[in-house]
Image (tube, rainbow, N blue to C red):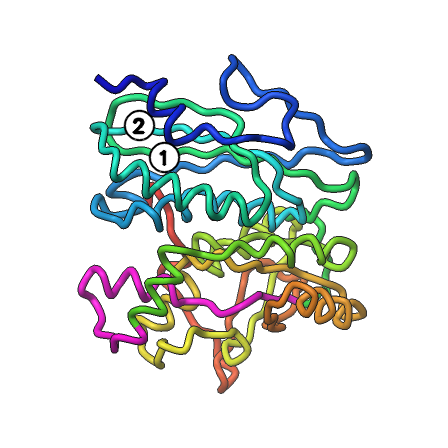
Amino acid sequence: MTSEFDLIARYFTRPSPAALLGVGDDAALLQPAPGMVLAVSSDMLVSGRHFFADADPYALGHKTLAVNLSDLAAMGARPRWATLSLALPKVDEGWLEAFSAGFFDIAQRFNVDLVGGDTTSGPLNLSVTVIGEVPAQQALRRDGAKVGDEIWVSGELGGAALGLRYLQGKVNLSEPQAAACLQRLHQPQPRVALGMALRGVASAAIDVSDGLLADLGHVLQRSGLGAQLELALIPAATALDDSEVALACLLAGGDDYELCFTAHPDHAAGVFSAAASAGVSVSRIGVLTATPGCRVLAANGKSIEMKVRGYDHFG
C-alpha cells in the first residue's frame, strides 16, 4: 500500500538549493537575501469550482503554481519558495506523475523551490503558498495609485474566459481559436519579469484573476479613487468579437493573469522600457480620477453598464 510519505518522496521531493532546509522536516528553514522583505501569497484550487474534474493533470500542475506566481508578479516580487498541499480522492500514480511534472516545470522556469506542504485523502483540492522577495519599500501595492495616474494592462484580456465558455458549450470557436483560448485558460503565464521591472515605475498593481473591472476595483478601493477606461484601448484576445458575451469576457471574465497597473504619465517611457525588458506588450487603457467608481466609455462616448463586473466565489 502506498503511504502519504511514499507519495511525497516519489513525486514532490526535489533538491531545494535556495532553502536552508526543505522537504523532509517539520518545517522549512528559509533565509531572505539582505535588504529584502518577504511577499507571501496563498491560493486554493477546488475541483468543480476552479477546474473540471477531468482536467489535464500536467496543465493543472502548471496552473496550480502559476496563479500564485501571478500574485507575486503583481507585488513586483521575485519568487523563491513554495509549499503545496493536496487532498486526493485516491492514489492515481499516473495523474500524480503528470501533475508533478507540470508543477515542477514551471517551478524550475522561475527558480522556485518546493519546500513543504501536506497530503491527505478527500475531494480533489490543491493549495499553494508561494513566498518571494522584494526590496524593502519597493513592493507594488494596491494603495499607491494617485489621481491622474494612467491605467495599463499587459498582454490581452478575455481569452481565458472565452475558453471556459467554449468548454461549457456556450460559444462556438474555430479550432485555432479554441486552442489559443484554452492555452490561456489552462496554462497562464505569470508576468513575473514585468512586475519586477515595474518597481519604481508603477504606483500600484494587481493581477487580473477575477476580471478587469473587479480587480481594478480593488485598486480603486484601496487607493480611494475612481477610473475612466476607454473600451477601444483595452487589448482584446483575437478570438473575441463584438458580442455581449465577448464584452463580458473582456471586462469581467477573469483567469487572464495579466497585470493591471497604474503609473504617473511621466513614467510612460519607463513602462514601455519595463515591458520591452520583460518581452510583454502593454496597453494604456484609461486614467484614475477623484470621482469614485469605474466608467467604461464606448467609442461614442457613452458609458457601458455591466451587470457582472467579475468572478465572485460566493456570488
Residue corresponding to mark 1: 126
Looking at the picture, tell me which residue is in the foreground, 62 or 71: 62
Q: Could you tell me which secondary element the residue under label 2 belongs to?
A: strand
Measured in 3D between alpha carbons, the distance from the residue under mark 2 to the one under mark 1, in whole angstroms, is 7 Å
Q: Is residue 178 magenta?
A: no
What are the residue bounds of the magenta stretch? 151-177
Residue at 66% in and 67% down:
275
Location of residue 29 in the rendering, given as x and y in whole percent from the top left corner: 63, 20
Q: Which mark is residue 164?
A: none
Residue at 64% in and 59% down:
194
Q: Is residue 172 magenta?
A: yes
Looking at the picture, tell me which residue is in the foreground, 295 or 82: 82
Mark 1 residue type: Leu
Position of 285 compared to 245: left or right?
A: right
Quadrant containing the N terminus in the rendered view = top left
Does the CB distance between marks 2 and 1 fall below 8 Å? yes
Q: Residue furthest left?
A: 169
Q: Residue furthest bottom?
A: 300
Residue at 27% in and 29% down:
88
Residue corresponding to mark 2: 87
Position of 82 compared to 169: left or right?
A: right
Mark 2 residue type: Ala
